[in-house]
Image (cartoon, grey):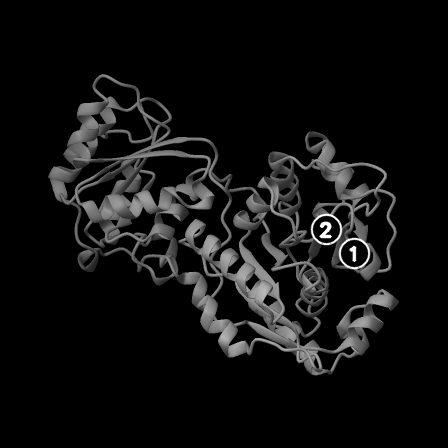
Amino acid sequence: MSDVAYNDDMDTEAPPVATEDPAPPPRAEDEPRGTQPANDQNAGEGGLAPVMKPVPRITIHAFCEFPESGSTIQRAGEDRRLAKAHLTVHMGGVAAAVEQYQTTSTPNLIIVETSASGNELFGQLGALAEVCDAGTKVIVVGHLNDVSLYREMIRQGVNEYLVAPLKPLAVIEAVSRLYIDPDAPPIGRTIAFMGAKGGVGSSTLAHNIGWSIAAGFNEDVVIADLDLPFGTAGLDFNQDPAQGIADALTAPERLDDVLLDRLLVKCTDRLSLFAAPAVLDREYEVDTESCESVIEIVRAGVPCVIVDLPHIWSPWTKKALLAADEVVITAMPDLASLRNTKNLVDLIRQARPNDAPPHLVLNQVGVPKRPEIPAKDFAEAIGMDPALVIPFNPGLFGTAANNGQMLEELEPKGKTSDNLRDLAQMLCGREASAGKARKSFSLKKLFSRKA
């Protein structure tokens, strides 16, 4: 039998509606999913979207009754978190699924939509269970927001129940939950930084934001410097590690907690550095899968990973940029930055339709005697307002770079430091800490062997 097990002893009567259920009020986890505001496809614009693990390589078949549901599920299948899954959408609902699987094996996951209720609904599910292979998971999309119906479906063996109309993120979350170990710790949020062109200060911003999240929000942070030949993370934090991220990228299959412990440089109690070698004695060929694997291993142990990407365009930098939970683009108010920023924003919006748009930072604004594009005109041209505008301040930035210090260490009460803290809060979704230590999700998980 499949995970949808037909119960011969089930009641012949339809489950009671929620208002007549004498049971205690339902818990949040008992609510049918799919209609909650948190599942809105644009949830990330008003607040941070949930961090979800990418779904493994599975096959998903969806059988819908209404074109709108099929379109939404198809959009969910194009999401970065379902990139490894193979999804096909059919029309016809449960009846079409039952007919197809009379002669073919079932996939890893079936999504079926039904507008039926009561005995008809459970009769359909019983027929589906009869043709499902063992281990097949089933998500039912219904049109009744009924807690009692949801509970009965779960009792009968349905893995998840979503209420139409669907939102892409609701579908993605439902699929992701089915393939995550409930005992596994949460994965960390990845924040990718890329400059619209070279020299705009993207790395400086990435390092300062990482430091601010660790120091001001009591969040464990790893900064991954992926500019292997020219990375400046070691200089910015006054560190000169003998090993670093290049060693992990050359042999990602060897990377575990023990090796990661050796390769990370601990800058503060909550901030660690995965430094680039920054030498030219060899050429660096970065494999897309190796880069993805290293980032996934790091984010399994800390709540925040800063991914400092170089200003190059290759398969691995594109994949790392588009796979991040949050993206920050740093630009200067000039024509080259404007063109490149627009290209990046358009690409990200097209490739990540279910994510919040990237965050734009305009840096080095107000250089004396230099013609500039006004911030308002820059924003209108790319169709988004900058999250932060940083005035030109060569004294502060130059002193910090030469001393191997962060801006907030030099000028903790300055306007620039205040703005960086605001951006850090926007990216990590945390309130500023009053000194209370966080009890869970610690870097200690990286510095100890698994049991």
Quarter of the view holding residue 96: top left
Compared to 65, does 434 lie above or below? below
Q: Position of residue 43 (x, y in %)?
A: 41, 62
Question: Residue visible at 76% across and 54% down?
Answer: 272
> How many neighbours does mark 2 have within 10 angstroms: few (below 14), some (14-19), or many (20 or more)?
many
Secondary structure state at the residue bearing disc 2 = strand
- Residue tagged by mark 1? 232
Compared to 238, does 117 lie above or below? above
Q: Which mark is drawn over residue 363?
A: none
Question: Residue visible at 82% across and 71% down?
Answer: 398
- Residue tagged by mark 2? 225
Q: Position of residue 254 (x, y in %)?
A: 72, 30
Residue type at the position of mark 1: Thr
Q: Are marks 2 and 1 in contact (CB under 8 Å)?
A: yes
Q: Is residue 8 visible?
A: no
Question: Residue visible at 75% across and 43% down?
Answer: 245
Q: Position of residue 212 (x, y in %)?
A: 70, 68
Compared to 254, does 196 lie above or below? below
Q: Position of residue 179 (x, y in %)?
A: 45, 37
Secondary structure state at the residue bearing disc 1 = loop
Compared to 218, does 171 lie above or below? above
Which of these two is toward me, 383 or 250? Answer: 383
Which residue sits furthest top? Answer: 103
> How many neighbours does mark 1 have within 10 angstroms: few (below 14), some (14-19), or many (20 or more)?
many
Which of these two is toward me, 403 or 343? Answer: 343
Residue type at the position of mark 2: Asp
Question: Residue visible at 36% across and 46% down?
Answer: 76
Q: Is residue 377 visible?
A: yes
Q: Earlier in the sequence, mark 2 or mark 1?
A: 2
- As measured in the structure, the alpha-carbon distance from the residue carrying label 2 to the one carrying label 1 is 8 Å
- The reply, left or right, for residue 444 in relation to residue 349 is right
